[in-house]
Amino acid sequence: MSHANTSPNFQALFSSYPCVTKKYCEVAQRACPYNNKLEKCSKGLGLRKNTIKMCDSGIFQKEGCSFDYQELFSIYERMKVDYGIIIDYLKKKDETIRSASEALQQFRERAYSFRLVGVAQGTTLEEYVECYQELKKIGYSCIAVGGLLKKAANSVRYVHVGDHQLLRDTLLTIRGASPEDWLFALGCYHPERHEFFSKTGIWGADYKGWIFNYDIGKGKKSSSIETKGRKELQRIRFNQTRKYLRKIYKLTRDKMDINNAPQTEMPPPVISRPHIRTSV
């Protein structure tokens, strides 16, 4: 998962995934044996087949979203995403619906390669349900539930679920009324909610948590103390990430049963491969 407020260099890397720089490529040690042609690389094709790329507008980033829909959709196309999310407004049902209507009108003007995802917003269970039903009415088949996060203390980032009961009630009510719909939980993934999402038939969820940069900047002079401090932080972050992903894997292996998930025209639920939202 990424967002549109990223640099051209990052967008190019995101677009070319899994063909990335040789430093991170699992196939190429020096030069790519396939001349960067993904269609010739069986391992690369396997990775891409089992990876879903999503992108949002970045409206909840510090810089916000300054794009109109034509610009935003061009970025989604350039990044070769599978799913592109509309511009939504936190806890503002009516503004989000107006934005969704505009997005759908723009989306229908040409043949885009990604699927457009609407977002249900609100402040109460009733508003979320009304927003969801209105999005379906105007033509959305892929809808995410957003606005369930709150800001972390002394931060501009939304990383914590603000109301766990509202989260559960909203997803259960929508799923009860629309048992076969494609449904995504924005920013809400956590191993503790894995089983709930699985049983509720949530297609996917992402996590707006850690942002990592494991590479120490090159060409910068630092004291030995600063260097040791950065290396220790990298070690701690790496261990945190490994522990987190192992927990997800265990949950997936022991508890996930996609055979009991609702069957739709969409691919089977991929909550077993939760999307870790990264912002660069």
Image (cartoon, rainbow, N blue to C red):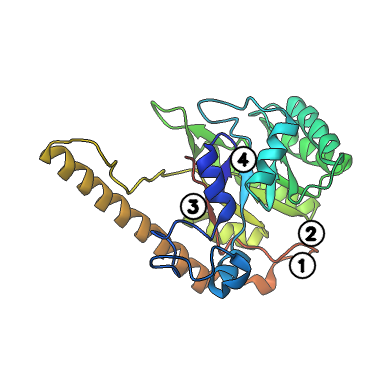
Q: Label for residue 17?
A: none
Among all residues in the image, which is located at the extreme left? 224
Mark 4: which amino acid?
Leu
Mark 4: secondary structure: helix
Residue in the image at 81% along x and 50% along y = 141
Q: Are marks 3 and 2 in contact (CB under 8 Å)?
A: no
Checking the image for residue 166, the label placed there is 4
The answer to which of 97 and 179 lies nearer the viewer is 97
Which residue lies under the disc numbered 1? 263
The residue labelled by disc 2 is 180
Q: In the rendered structure, which amino acid carries the disc numbered 2?
A: Glu
Q: Is residue 149 above or below residue 276?
A: above
Circle 2 SS class: loop
**SS at circle 3:** loop
Cα–Cα span, label 4 and label 1: 26 Å
Mark closest to the chain's N terminus, 1 or 2: 2
| Marks 1,3: beta carbons within 8 A | no
